[in-house]
Image (cartoon, helix red, strand yellow):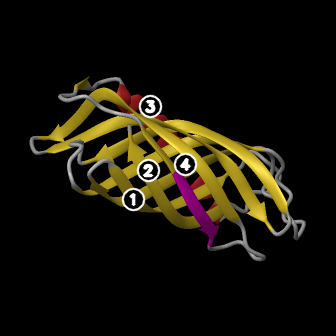
């Protein structure tokens, strides 16, 4: 039941991020693309499940300012890689909106939230555990540090099928992100 509720929340978060992009104002400065890699490990998957992925995050020329001193920036993140479980690996691709605070591209801490549709090539892993289909939603929160043109962070993510499949155990992962601004 928990997986279904989290999956529905992921679906709603994705819709909310897309909805929030519309009423934005032009941002100051010139946003640049981030290219990076991430290494994740499941915390709730018996038998071990890892993710290795390449990612590109393209910022939009928009900001959202809900309060006088709070600015968020929008972007879109595309990632592709492998879910690895024992000897089996499954390719995936994911694309979706991101929301980052603070919007300024300066040295220091940042937080990025994203929610994106995800396609996984096969959902049965080594121990016969099924994730329930090939279409999923991935919601993530990254706490990170910006320095020069580098970004590093700790990413927390949940992937589930939003109760669209026969089973929906969901996968919770934690891992490291390293990216460079181009």
User: What SS does tag 2 mark?
Assistant: strand
- Which class describes the residues within 10 Å of circle 3: few (<14), some (14-19), or many (20+)? some
Please report the residue visible at 86 percent of the width from the left and 58 percent of the height from the top: 124
According to the picture, the residue beneath numbered tag 2 turns out to be: 179
Give the CA distance from mark 3 to mark 1: 25 Å
Q: Position of residue 143 (x, y in %)?
A: 37, 61
User: What SS does tag 3 mark?
Assistant: helix
Q: Position of residue 22 (x, y in %)?
A: 35, 23
Give the CA distance from mark 1 to mark 4: 24 Å
In magenta, the rendered stretch is 37-42
According to the picture, the residue beneath numbered tag 1 turns out to be: 152
Q: Position of residue 81 (x, y in %)?
A: 67, 48
Residue most toward the left? 68
Please report the residue visible at 44 percent of the width from the left and 56 percent of the height from the top: 141
Give the CA distance from mark 3 to mark 4: 13 Å
Q: Earlier in the sequence, mark 1 or mark 2?
A: 1
According to the picture, the residue beneath numbered tag 4 turns out to be: 10
Side (left or right) of 124 relative to 99: right
Give the CA distance from mark 3 to mark 2: 24 Å
Can you tell which of label 3 and label 2 is closer to the viewer? Answer: 2
Give the CA distance from mark 1 to mark 2: 6 Å
Are the two marked residues, 3 and 4, in contact with CB atoms closer than 8 angstroms? no
Is most of the magenta stretch helix, strand or loop?
strand
Q: Is residue 125 magenta?
A: no
According to the picture, the residue beneath numbered tag 3 turns out to be: 18
- Which class describes the residues within 10 Å of circle 1: few (<14), some (14-19), or many (20+)? many
User: What SS does tag 4 mark?
Assistant: helix
């Amino acid at each position: 039941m928990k997986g279904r509720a989290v999956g529905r929340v992921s679906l709603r978060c994705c819709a909310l991020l897309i909805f929030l992009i519309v009423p934005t104002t032009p941002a100051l400065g010139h946003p640049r693309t981030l290219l990076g890699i991430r290494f994740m490990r499941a915390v709730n998957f018996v038998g071990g499940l890892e993710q290795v992925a390449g990612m590109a995050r393209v910022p939009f020329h928009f900001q959202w300012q809900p309060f006088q001193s709070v600015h968020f920036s929008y972007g879109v993140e595309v990632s592709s890689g492998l879910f690895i479980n024992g000897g089996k690996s499954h390719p995936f691709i994911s694309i979706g909106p991101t929301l980052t605070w603070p919007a300024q591209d300066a040295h220091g801490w940042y937080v990025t939230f994203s929610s994106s549709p995800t396609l996984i090539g096969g959902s049965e892993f080594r121990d016969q555990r099924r994730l329930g289909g090939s279409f999923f939603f991935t919601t993530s929160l990254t706490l990170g540090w910006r320095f020069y043109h580098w970004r590093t962070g700790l990413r927390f993510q949940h992937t589930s099928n939003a109760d669209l499949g026969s089973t929906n155990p969901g996968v919770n992962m934690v891992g490291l992100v390293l990216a460079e601004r181009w």
